[in-house]
Image (tube, grey):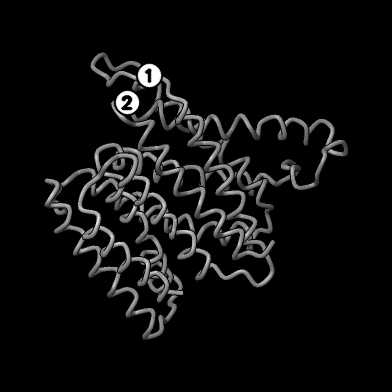
Amino acid sequence: MSWLLLTIGSAFLLGFYDYFKKLALHDNAVLPVLFGSVAAGALVWLPFVLWSALAPDSLPAGFLHVTGISARSHGLLLAKAVLVGASWLCGYYGIKSLPLSIASPIRATGPLWTITFAVLLFHESPSPKQWLGVALILVSFFAFSFVGRLEGIHFHRNRSVFFMVAATLLGAASTLYDKFLLQGTHLSPSQVQAWFTIYTCIILVPPLALWLRQHDRHPFHWHWAIAAIGLTLLGADILYFTAITQPGALISLISPVRRSSVVIAFLLGIFLFREKHLRSKGACIAGIITGVILLS
């Protein structure tokens, strides 16, 4: 399967991933929902980690072999877990309070920050078309702030908006880091996903323990969508990681195509959560998607 089709499949699953997050976080505590969703993914990979270590020759597919990496690689994957864990934590707190049709478009501006990091860190020179894309995304994001005011959300002083922006910045950094891991260190997609998922689960234990010690903590209740978050992300990420490793794969195209998941999340927010201002939000999303395409 081509890297473009893999990326489109990843985008489709990511749209439902955002929907399941919103569903699971409704009147629910953030930390246990995040931990439960990550644990669901880790539990899928843990048997294959043990299988790879004990009887690698009996694995049904070489793709499932996830052991045999160096201590340095483990350190790099632990660093990815810290980066992604921070991004997810900010994103969960943001999406809990914001309408899905606003939270997802904020995350869709990720390619803007990816190209910004590329300019600042790697001294890349965007083309005039890419600068036009940057401008269009910024204008659309600014327009979204006015749409948000119709629902009582003031972007410049809303804490949930800042959480979503922080999650987006960290996610953009993670995108560049993924390219390094998969193309620079030659780790396989399954090795990256298995170990960073397990490490993320481990680093979330201390904050979860602190949450459990709070007497005035927000109540938690189990919801089937918590497991669905982890399993949907598992599918989306394995398609994404596999796409990056394909010959000729372009991260500058993969990133914007993957962010088209905002369209699915937007439609789910409108039709399932009955969110308002369809036309205004749709116009802003169209501007963001067009800008993202221009970045490629």
Which disc number belongs to residue 125?
none
Residue shown at 42% from the left, 82% from the top: 125
Amino acid type, residue under disc 1 in the picture: His
Q: Residues within 10 Å of mark 1 (few under 14, many from 20)?
A: few
Q: Residues within 10 Å of mark 2 (few under 14, many from 20)?
A: some
Residue 27, position in %: x, y? 28, 26
Residue 217, position in %: x, y? 27, 19
Residue shown at 42% from the left, 72% from the top: 293
Q: Residue 78: which quarter of the image?
A: top right
Which comes before the other along the chain, label 2 or label 1? 2
**Which residue is labeled 2 in the image?**
28
Amino acid type, residue under disc 2 in the picture: Asn
**Number of numbered tags placed on the structure image:** 2
Q: Residue 22: which quarter of the image?
A: top left
Q: Are marks 2 and 1 in contact (CB under 8 Å)?
A: yes
Residue 218, position in %: x, y? 27, 21
Say if 142 sits above or below 105 in the image. Answer: below
Compare residues 295 and 117 and report the one nearer the observer: 295
Q: Residue 280: which quarter of the image?
A: bottom left
Residue shown at 42% from the left, 52% from the top: 264
View extreme (right): residue: 57
